Amino acid sequence: MSNSEPITEKPLDFIRQIVTEDLKTGKHPTPVTRFPPEPNGFLHIGHAKSICLNFGIASEFNGRCYLRFDDTNPSKEETAYVQAIKEDVKWLGFDWGDNLFYSSDYFDQLYDFALDLIRRKKAFVCDLSADEMREYRGTLTEPGKESPHRNRTVEENLELFQGMKNGDFSEGSHVLRAKIDMASPNLNMRDPIIYRIMNLHHHRTGDKWCIYPMYDYTHCLSDAIEEITHSLCTLEFEDHRPLYDWVLDTLETPVHPQQIEFARLNLTYTVMSKRKLMQLVQDGHVSDWDDPRMLTVSGLRRRGYTPASIRDFCKEIGIGKKESWIDMGVLENCVRNDLNITAPRVMGVLDPLKVVITNYPEGTVEDIEAKNHPQNPEMGSRTLPFSREIYIERTDFMENAPKKFFRLDIGREVRLRYAYFITCVSVVKDEDSGEVIELHCTYDPETYGGNAPDGRKVKGTIHWLSAEQAERCEIRMYDRLFKVENPDADKDVNFKEHLNPDSLTSLNNCLVEPSLADAKPGTCVQFERQGYFCIDSRDSKPGALVFNRTVGLRDSWAKRKK
Ligand code: ATP
Ligand code: MG
């Protein structure tokens, strides 16, 4: 039915192999995974990879996947992000059911675990300043130095830690540290901080706490509390795994999830970190987190990407252990393949040129039957008004055109899609500029439907719209947000230096067929011969439609690169 290539069934990735094995040996009756975003920004396409992996495993192996907000840093987190993240996960097609959790749900338990660590002589309150602590930490080649407070008694530590909790100390004056090994070759194991004082309001716990647990300490314990079986994260956490295991082993938690790392998604022509995406928003380089040029889930949605196309993409790129780069073209292909099957075909003219059909009766409007999808009759058809004055695409006319130009020039004949053959007879030019502003053509009434009874052939078929009924609209054309494949490659050049100044072009004089006048925001269509377009969900209004170009019909980028 479609031109899209079927997504070939791949062998199980290494994580699914581990899960399969664990179910076979009875290590776990069912897998329990989690997607643990920090609510400090919107989700991006990299998060989609993690969502598809975690929720995908749960659904394929009859398990559960939890949505857990990792909300331990109130200085950067907001409720608005929580809402946006939930919406994005749902939109991608995944359901956490009742399993919506927050790390902050566990603050009491985490505090108790910290007391337990102190009693086990495995944690201590340290008064070193941040600078001193850095000095004591050592380097990759030199061991660190033990803190002078490392050997405080259990009683002293309990009292000081409770003091921290009660707000007796100022920010930065005290921290709670795990007591592990200052000589460890792994810097994460050199008595890492597990609690710090922050006099900040938390979006869920309010002003109850002025101490907040660190990520490494919180994450493993949240996993254990939720009885996660496989804790899947990206490769940069490989060096944190010894700490993950140390916390759970030291506290002898009844459940010890297995952390497994996989390679993160790196995509060309974009940046992926929330911190950088935030800068693009805050500095006004894009309109917002959901700007259609952003590789956020909300930006892709607004651009016209479908949930299925993003899931297909994640399946296509797979899960591995080695860092790699995925070409943006792969993502674009996925949406093109999906929309090729699902998007109705319509007529849209980006740069209109008026055509007067001089032998067509004045005042007559004819209904032309047009298929909604040439390969899928089930999608039905609609009627298009046809009349004496129409618009065609300016690029479909060329004066003194070369032989191979199969569109219009004086004396040449083309087929108007679903309607008649027309022949260009003369042109009208602007007196000052010399620009062609109107074509005069004749039509052959015998060619309705696109065939001549005398068997004569035309090579070109072009799209068109009846002048009076066409709906005026704005179309936003997008190019890559960055000019280079990896905007982060050179550490001495700020990634924003690589922004593409021409990433957005607004065309304000476009026309679409009247059937779209009442179409809902988010509607995706194919403009025949032009590409896939989606009605903008923010700026489009009845009577003032705005379209975003999702993607072209072919991978023109691949050609441009050569
Ligand atoms: P960012 O740097 O973009 O903020 P993050 O890892 O800090 O990313 P989190 O909200 O902590 O963002 O991430 C939630 C989950 O998504 C984590 O398990 C993380 O490993 C995963 N994740 C983040 N970025 C990617 C990526 N590019 N590819 C695959 N998974 C990712
Ligand atoms: Mg993070």
Image (cartoon, rainbow, N blue to C red):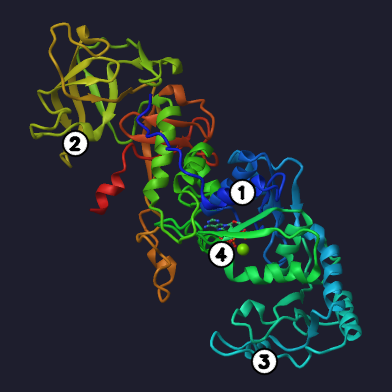
The residue under label 3 is 145
Q: CA distance from mark 4 to mark 2?
A: 52 Å
Above or below residue 464? Residue 350 is below
> Which residue appears at 89% of the width and 77% of the height?
162
Q: Amino acid at mark 3?
A: Lys
Where residue 275 sits in the image (x, y, percent)? 56, 64
Where residue 461 sits in the image (x, y, percent)? 23, 23
Furthest residue toward front: 25
Q: CA distance from mark 4 to mark 1?
A: 38 Å
Where residue 331 sits in the image (x, y, percent)? 42, 46
CB contact under 8 Å: marks 4 and 2 = no
Earlier in the chain: of badge 4 and badge 3, it is 3
Q: Amino acid at mark 2?
A: Asp
Q: Say which mark, if any, is on residue 430.
A: 2
Most foreground residue, 416 or 551: 551
Earlier in the chain: of badge 3 and badge 1, it is 1
Where residue 465 sits in the image (x, y, percent)? 33, 23
Most foreground residue, 510 or 522: 522
Q: Secondary structure at mark 1?
A: helix
Q: Nearer the viewer, mark 4 or mark 1?
A: 1
Q: Amino acid at mark 4?
A: Arg
CB contact under 8 Å: marks 3 and 1 = no
> Which residue appears at 71% of the width and 88% of the height?
129
Q: CA distance from mark 4 to mark 3?
A: 33 Å
